Amino acid sequence: MYKQENVKPYNGNGEKGELVEQLFNNIASTYDTLNHRLSWNIDKGWRKAAIKLLMPFKPKCILDIATGTGDFAILAAQMLQPERLVGADISEGMMNIGVEKVRKAGLENIISFKKEDCMNLSFEENTFDAVITAFGIRNFQCLDKGLSEMYRVLKPDGHLCIAELTTPVSFPMKQLFRFYSNYILPAYGSLISKDRDAYEYLTKSIEAFPQGEEMMTILKKAGFHKTTFKRHTFGICTIYFASK
């Protein structure tokens, strides 16, 4: 068990998966506004950098795990032009917003949404050319199980691309990020969403999540190879790339 699996929203009263579902249903209406404001819109660049890694492979069938309100799915559809993209998430409240965004983008024929438990995906083995996920895997109840499910549904020679928030490792960004994430982020998140617990959980989940070389070891344990990672914006985001 990894440290982040013990970090739960709302004081941890219940299974982590159930609490995460409750959290994101609660903040769904303000999630996009806060996400972009709290990152100064830099998160859009992180998503684009991640998707660019897949462009040489031209994946036709893509799964976006922990799709949330669909930002990563929409960008992937626009940049990669797949035949099919499925956004999977545990929170119907988040996906309901994603459905409307997909409609406005004119991508209903490509992107669909499905409520899924990422620990036990309903898709058959060897279904997708690529699996992508942005800022969601630190919420997994069991990281090893979630990654093994991603591996299972990928086709042979398919690719996994993960963008995740991480903690900077160098002075002074490490100290600045700690102050921002422990004080400013929860206060502003509480002001807009009225759910301070959600944004205190966000900080704790980032700090507890394995990163860098440790994450490389975990990906290899799940069966992936050709694993690489690159830190972005002084280490606030890390993008991982691996193959089946």
Image: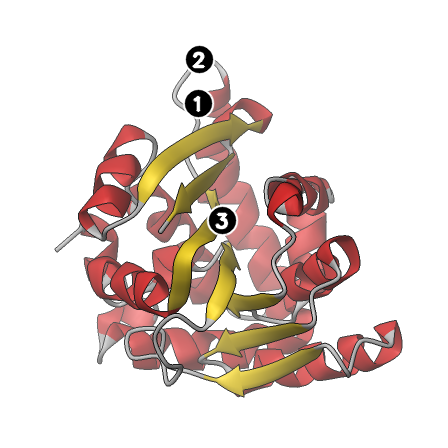
How far apart marks 3 and 2 lie (CA) works out to 28 Å
Q: Give the residue at x 63% y 72%.
A: 85
* Residue at image mark 3: 161
Dot 1 crowding, Cα within 10 Å, few <14, some 14–19, many 20+:
few
- Above or below, 236 against 87 in this view is above
Quarter of the image where the N terminus is located:
bottom left
In the displayed structure, does residue 221 sit left or right of residue 36? left
Please tell me which residue lies in front, 32 or 191.
32
Residue 17: image location, x then y, percent: 31, 76
Q: Is residue 58 left or right of residue 170?
A: right
User: Which label belongs to residue 175?
Assistant: 1
Drawn side of residue 24 relative to residue 155, left or right: right
> Within 10 angstroms of label 2, few (less than 14), some, or many (20 or more) residues?
few
- Badge 2 vs badge 1, beta-carbon distance below 8 Å: yes
Q: Earlier in the sequence, mark 3 or mark 1?
A: 3
Looking at the image, residue 236 sits to the left or right of residue 228; the answer is: right
Residue carrying label 2: 171
Which is nearer the eye, 39 or 224? 224
Q: Secondary structure at mark 1?
A: helix
Residue type at mark 2: give it.
Answer: Phe
